[in-house]
Amino acid sequence: SPPLTQLPPLATIISEEQPIEQSKAAVIKYARVHGQELSEIGVNLNFAPVVDLNKGVINPQDKFSQIYRRAISTDREVVAKVALWYCQTLEEYGVKCTIKHFPGLGRVDTDTHIDHAELDTPLSELVADDWVPFRQVMNNSQAFTMLGHAKLMAVDDQNPVSFSSAVVGDMIRKSWQHDGVLITDDFCMQAVYSSKAGLAAATIEAINAGIDLVLIAFTQDLYYPAMDALLKADQAGILDQVVLDKSYRRLEQAKIISRG
């Protein structure tokens, strides 16, 4: 593919020493570069921005997640506004953004690429803080939401959020009535691959919970056991047809798939 403009992290173009509105023009200019260049090469989905809050959690064993380096800000309102400006600008170019990594990895000190992780924070605190950017962008844009592999202990202490029916189906789809596209973080991560459920069962549980897209990226060969599990589950009548129909509609509306 042609070279794309290398831009610094979003956090570097805003100043928390002044009202965030004064950085709006800079954020929009930044997003226009991404939107225009991605659109020109035919890309209609961007796996950004990170809307996890920077809680200053640093673990020497965290080699890949490193949210403290990738987060926009420590301030929930700043993150919410910057992320929304970014996503709405990309949409002007026909490119959708992806906010990540719900339920928020800023407080998590374990790298889900290599181990299991837990988010053991009261829901009331998450609602008032970490989830503000997620909810604001989800409610005011066409953004996809990427679900991470940490367990949300207050809701489901058994399964990572990415394939938890209690979190995805009951909370996000039913309680919040969110009808946007949900995508998982990479299912090749150890938090899923070595979970009690295992890759195949986790894939089925994710789809039945209301996840629209299961991401398999790093280890491409894992696509085959995941797809095999889904095909067999479909033939056995294990997949929820009502949930599948809703997912198909969402993906069609998002122009990810087409009946044609």
Image: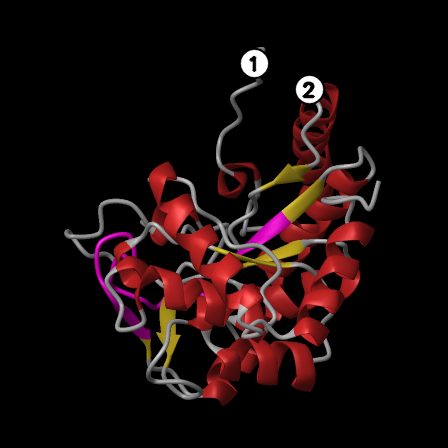
Q: What element carries label 2?
A: loop
Left/right of residue 200 with respect to residue 175 in the rendered view: left
Q: Dominant secondary structure of the magenta stretch?
A: loop
Vertical relation: 151 (above or below) 68: below
| Residue 185 at x, y percent in the picture | 45, 54
Residue at 25% in and 66% down: 116
What is the residue that sits farthest to the left in this orientation?
60
| Residue 28 at x, y percent in the picture | 73, 37
**Residue 177 in which image quadrant:** bottom right
**Residue 146 in which image quadrant:** bottom right
Question: Of the residues under marks 2 and 1, which one precedes in the sequence?
Answer: 1
Q: Which of 128 and 231 is in front in this view?
A: 231
For disc 2, the marked residue is 41
- Give the number of the disc on residue 1: 1
Vertical relation: 158 (above or below) 57: below
Residue at 65% in and 29% down: 34
| Residue 142 at x, y percent in the picture | 76, 54
What is the residue that sits farthest to the top in this orientation?
2
The residue type indicated by label 2 comes to: Ile
State the extent of the magenta-drawn residues as a range: 98-118
Q: Reply yes or no: does residue 115 show up in magenta.
A: yes
> How many residues crowd around disc 2 within 10 Å: few (fewer than 14), some, or many (20 or more)?
few
| Residue 199 at x, y percent in the picture | 34, 60
Left/right of residue 122 with respect to residue 255 in the rendered view: left
Q: What element carries label 1?
A: loop
Number of numbered labels in the structure image = 2
CA gap, disc 2 to disc 1?
8 Å
Residue at 74% in and 66% down: 245
Q: Which of 115 and 257 is in front in this view?
A: 257
